[in-house]
Image (cartoon, rainbow, N blue to C red):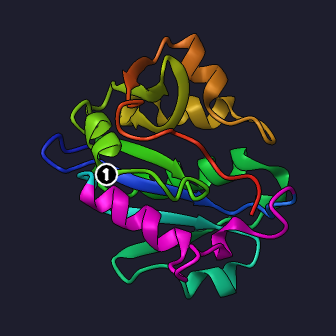
């Protein structure tokens, strides 16, 4: 399906990993108040300006799917054990069936992300766009990948190495978001 520049970017939540350092799949993580991190990610992407939201699941997929809000679509990745590359490829492939000109990628382990950070990237959405949130100059998440880059990103990722080498090689635009939140992901409970 061709991209439509009038369609908001697709949100893509990466939540397929086993979370070995975390002590279990982060797709099952909740805030102290019991709110699933998956729900927070979907909410933030929608509030930040994304249209369709895809949630990529692997480890504990059946249990995690129950935590995915109804307005999001679950994408199951069979080879999730091979690393984040499989999740990103599956998500981009699923996004390609829709009309969005770009995706905003957000790992599930960023439950404190604010919609304003996502909105800064959404404003740059275009088929050839490539942008990454930065925190005092250091790259982080979310990441905006225009449709023109999806095939190349999918071909470049390997194992547990995501899109970062591609973003560096293509000189992705840094979008400073350190004034909005820390940009920290959570590797421990």
Residue 1 visible in the current orientation: no
Magenta region = 21-47
Locate residue 115 relative to residue 66 in the image: left or right. left
Disc 1 packing (10 Å; few <14; some 14–19; many ≥20): some
Q: Quadrant of residue 63?
A: bottom right
Please, what secondary structure does the residue beneath circle 1 have?
helix
Q: In this orientation, which residue lies closer to the viewer: 178 or 134? A: 178
Q: Quadrant of residue 5?
A: top left
Residue 178 falls within the magenta-colored stretch? no
Residue beneath the point at 52% across and 81% down: 33
Q: Disc 1 designates what residue?
A: 115
Residue beneath the point at 40% across and 45% down: 104
Q: In this orientation, which residue lies closer to the viewer: 1 or 41? A: 41
Locate residue 43 relative to residue 90 in the image: left or right. left
Residue beneath the point at 42% across and 30% down: 178
As drawn, 90 above or below 138 = below
Residue 27 falls within the magenta-colored stretch? yes
């Amino acid at each position: 399906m061709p991209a439509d520049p009038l369609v908001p970017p697709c949100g893509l939540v990466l939540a397929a990993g086993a979370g070995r350092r975390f002590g279990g799949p982060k797709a099952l993580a909740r805030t102290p108040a019991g709110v699933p991190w998956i729900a927070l990610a979907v909410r933030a992407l929608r509030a930040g300006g994304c249209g369709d939201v895809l949630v990529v699941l692997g480890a504990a997929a059946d249990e995690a799917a129950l935590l995915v809000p109804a307005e999001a679509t679950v994408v199951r990745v069979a080879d999730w054990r091979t690393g984040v590359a499989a999740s990103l490829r599956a998500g981009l492939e699923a996004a390609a069936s829709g009309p969005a000109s770009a995706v905003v990628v957000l790992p599930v382990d960023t439950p404190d992300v604010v919609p304003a950070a996502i909105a800064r990237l959404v404003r740059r959405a275009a088929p050839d766009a490539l942008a990454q949130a930065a925190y005092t100059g250091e790259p982080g998440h979310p990441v905006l990948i225009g449709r023109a880059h999806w095939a190349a990103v999918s071909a470049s990722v390997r194992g547990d190495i995501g899109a970062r080498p591609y973003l560096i090689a293509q000189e992705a635009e840094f979008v400073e978001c350190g004034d909005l939140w820390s940009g920290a992901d959570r590797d421990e409970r």
